[in-house]
Amino acid sequence: MAEYVRGAPEVAVIRMCNPPLNTISDVMLRALSEEVNRANIDPTVKAVVICGANGKFSAGADIRGFSVGIEKNTLSLESVAALIEKSEKPFVAAIEDIAFGGGLELALGCHYRIANMKAQFGLPEVKIGLLPGGGGTQRLPRLIGIPTALDMITTGKYVPATEALKLGLLDEIVEENPFEAAIKLARRILGQPVGPRRLSLKQTPKLPNMEAFLHEALLKVKKQAPGCLSPEMCFRAVEASVYLPFAEGIRKEKELFLLLLTSDQAKALQYAFFAERISKKWMLPNGASWKTVSPQPIRKAAVIGLGTMGQGIVVSLVKAKIPVVALEKDKKHLEIARKAIKASLERETLRMQQKGKTLDIHKSKLLHFTLDFGALKDVDLVIEAVFEDMVLKKETFCKLSEICKPEAFLGTNTSCLDIDEIASITNRPQQVIGTHFFSPAHVMKLIEIIRGQHTSPTAIATIMNLAKMMDKCGIVVENCFGFVGNRLLSSYTEQTYFLLEEGSTPEEMDKILEEFGFKLGPFKVSDLAGLDVGWKSRIGQGLTGVNLPLGTPPRQRDGKRYSPLPDILCENRRYGQKTGKGWYLYDKPGGKIAKSDPWLHNFLQNYRKAHNMTTRTITQEEILERCLYSLVNEGFQILSEGIASCPEAIDTIYLNGYGWPRHKGGPMFYASEVGLPKILTKLQKYAEANPDIPKLQPSPFLQKLVTLGSPPLKNWPSLVSPQQSKL
Ligand code: NAI
């Protein structure tokens, strides 16, 4: 686990070897401590370099054994960092590529740190519900000060070597492997006292307005992930570095770490971390899979339709350094899009520069704007993002089929339409695939990758690879109306409208769901996204508007309960923020601050009267259960239909595309934590009270799982009937 060699006659080298990322385990800690002791007692050794094998320093503790040392009271990471720091011989950390979590904490125990240009640094424990428990919360603020240390520790963000040098986290950076430079540095400092380099002996640098700063910082941390414990505990630990001596600060760090380690939230966040990895591993019933199928290269792509989504998709492709042909239907829209994309790319360039990366949009000639379909003849992939209209989509794909080279892949960004129907118009249905990005597409991580009945495994592998190149999370799902995410969402929003009819208010429901952990409640989300988006879709489905058959009861469609409330708002041009009013009132069109709107409350009262509905007081419990349990119920249905391969895929989609609070794991994980029997019983109760709402009828798959004694979530896919398993 740790090699001990000589780097120079008086310099010992301890090399961490735990491929591929030199993660820190119990065994590694023991080996490190033995080698540190060996160097300490060898009189011929005057300085020590610590480095990592395999071109990496260390990715930190293995997430599966995160409690290394601390829980079992064996050797802890902090005790090894302290052992290094206490040495009378200078220790130099030679950091290649990554020093994350425990890896960085070990480096903070060293007296000097040197890294290559490409190296990245971070303490990401907060993201999995923990805090850096190896002394990081006490040493880092002493080294780089409270503001930056707090930012790094409470967000888990990574900083590049150039920034780390400016912050004082590093003593030097070099172009390539820092090993030789570390040996040189070690020889240069021989004989110099190490006392002044021990971080535990330093004070955290004071700020003139420390209390006010910490007060503001805490508010920011709480806002960043409402209801999530780990950022606040990270804050508390770092705060201790200001007010407590080092040893007491370490005790506080340990106490808070143990509190988090056993929390439900850490379990949920770690589940979410693994769920993303599990759900990327797609496999088809014929055995084709992520392992066996190679992606085709995308040397040049095209995006058709440069509205809200098309613009973001273009930016994502350019960021991945893929040349893009960007096509619109007329000059006016092309110019609007050109300006918006340019501005967005400039913002991205700035953002990437701050992260130490480059994106030279001017030199790279990555973008070609056009009105001419002929410009698409040599692209490897087209992503269509025109209006959500089957006729228009089919027209577009028919043209693409004629113009694009036969091996080009054709993706559609449709949010719910039938991929097979779109593919049927082309001469290459095997190359047609759903590429469902989320808004704003250059920010949101998720892409639902929809497999039509003819979509080839190569098309799937290629789009999965593209997602990776764009630093996004691709999840393969089957074709059905709304796919996975929008199906879950519509179950949830449908309940919010029904509850509104029955007596609740947007303010009340938003508050309850925000307290549950959503950053924005459903009505604020609807105002932000624009009520007209769903309205157009409902008009298209004939649920409202001119296509609605005369005589259709206002609150019923196909014998099921229907709420026309969002349609009526749209008919009154209340589209949300963009028109200055929706479920809330805004100071102006485009305004962002939601205020309660007396018009809406008055309207709701009249609406209830007109439909002979008695307003009732609805409990918080009922609001939460009807919204969330109907959502997870749809998840069980999706699983049983084989639309998603596993609950982890559903959770990853909902976490990355729909703002489900990460510290609650994902809807299916949440269901397993609440307990399937409870969810079933409650759904049965609500279904009985609302026989005209089919989405409250418990899914037969949920019933089957309860009958089987609620097996653990990881076993659910194996219990789906084999005829239904498509992924
Ligand atoms: P949008 O209305 O903002 O943009 C559509 C663009 O397509 C317009 O700029 C229009 O000029 C252009 N266009 C129309 N016909 C064209 C043609 N024949 N040739 C070239 N360009 C043409 O629509 P948005 O919101 O960007 O949606 C696009 C697609 O993405 C739809 O299928 C939608 O369902 C889907 N989607 C939308 C999301 C959203 O939040 N807005 C989220 C995910 C998917």
Image (spheres, rainbow, N blue to C red):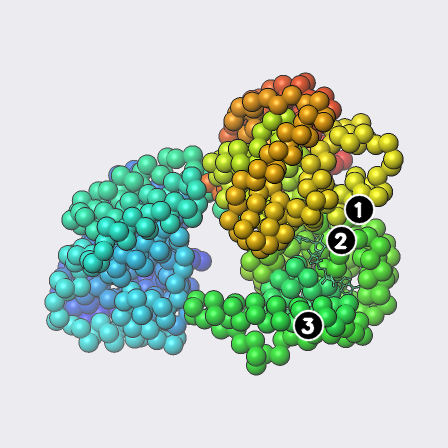
Amino acid type shown at disc 3? Glu
Q: Residue at 69% of width from left, 48% of height from top?
A: 573
- The residues tagged by marks 1 and 3 sit, at their Cα atoms, a distance apart of 29 Å
Q: Which mark is residue 388?
A: 2
Compare residues 443 and 448 and report the one nearer the observer.
443
Identify residue for label 1: 540
Give the number of the disc on residue 276.
none
Q: Looking at mark 2, is its residue's CB closer than 8 Å to ligand 1?
A: yes
What is the secondary structure assignment of the residue under circle 2?
loop
Residue type indicated by callout 1 = Gly
Task: Give the vertical position of 251 relative to 708 (above or below).
Answer: below
**Residue sitting at x 33%, y 73%:** 173
Q: Quadrant of the N terminus?
A: bottom left
Which residue is pictured at 65% across the width and 55% down the height? 437
Label whose residue precedes the other's in the sequence (2 or 1): 2
Q: Is residue 707 above or below residue 250?
A: above
Q: Viewer-nearest of labels 3 and 2?
A: 3
486 up-or-down from 104: above or below: above
- Cβ atoms under marks 2 and 1 closer than 8 Å: yes
